[in-house]
Amino acid sequence: MILSEISTRQSATRPSPSALFQRERETGPLVRLRAGAQPVTPAEGAASRLLIERGSLSLAELRRFLADHLLSEEQRQGGWAVDVGIWGSGLFQREADRLIAGWSGRLLTID
C-alpha cells in the first residue's frame, strides 16, 4: 500500500481538527469577562482583550491561549534558550489553569 492510500484511509476514519475543535467548544464550559472587571497583570489584560473581542470562549480555548501567551512572555525574557524552546506552551498549561482558577469570580464567569 502506498503512502497516499494510507493517508486517505486514516483521514476518512479520523475527525478533522476543526470538527474536534468545534465539538470541544460546544461541550465545554464557557468563559466570559465579568462586567466591570479590571485586569491587573499583563496576562489578565491579554485574556480580557481576547474575551472583549470574542465575547466568550470555551475553557479549553482560554487555557490554550493563556499557555501560548505565557510561552511568548517567557521567550521574550530569554526562555527560548532553555527547555521552553523545546517543549513549547505545554509547559505552561498548569500555570494557565492556576490563573483561570484564581480569576474565576473576580475577572471571569465560567458557565
Image: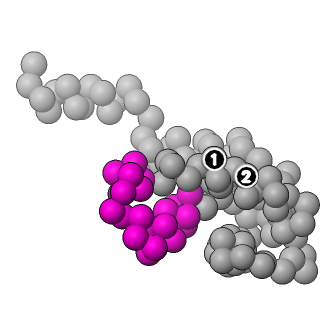
Are the two marked residues, 1 and 2, in contact with CB atoms closer than 8 angstroms?
A: yes
Disc 1 versus disc 2: distance between alpha carbons?
6 Å
Seen from the viewer's position, the closer of residues 53 and 76 is: 76
Mark 2, residue position? 98
Could you say where residue 46 lies in the image, as x and y percent from the top left? 64, 75
Magenta range:
67-88
Q: Amino acid at mark 2?
A: Arg
Locate residue 68, reporting x and y percent: 51, 61
Q: Can residue 31 be seen from the camera position used here? A: yes
* SS assignment for the magenta stretch, majority: helix
Q: Which residue is mark 1?
A: 94
Q: Is residue 99 left or right of residue 36?
A: left
The image quarter in which residue 3 lies: top left
Answer few, some or many: residues within 10 Å of disc 1's Cα (few below 14, many 20 plus, some between 14 and 19). Answer: few
Q: Is residue 92 above or below residue 76?
A: above
* Residue 59 locus on image (x, y percent): 70, 51
- Which label is found at residue 33? none
Q: Secondary structure at mark 1?
A: helix
Q: Nearer the viewer, residue 68 or 16?
A: 68
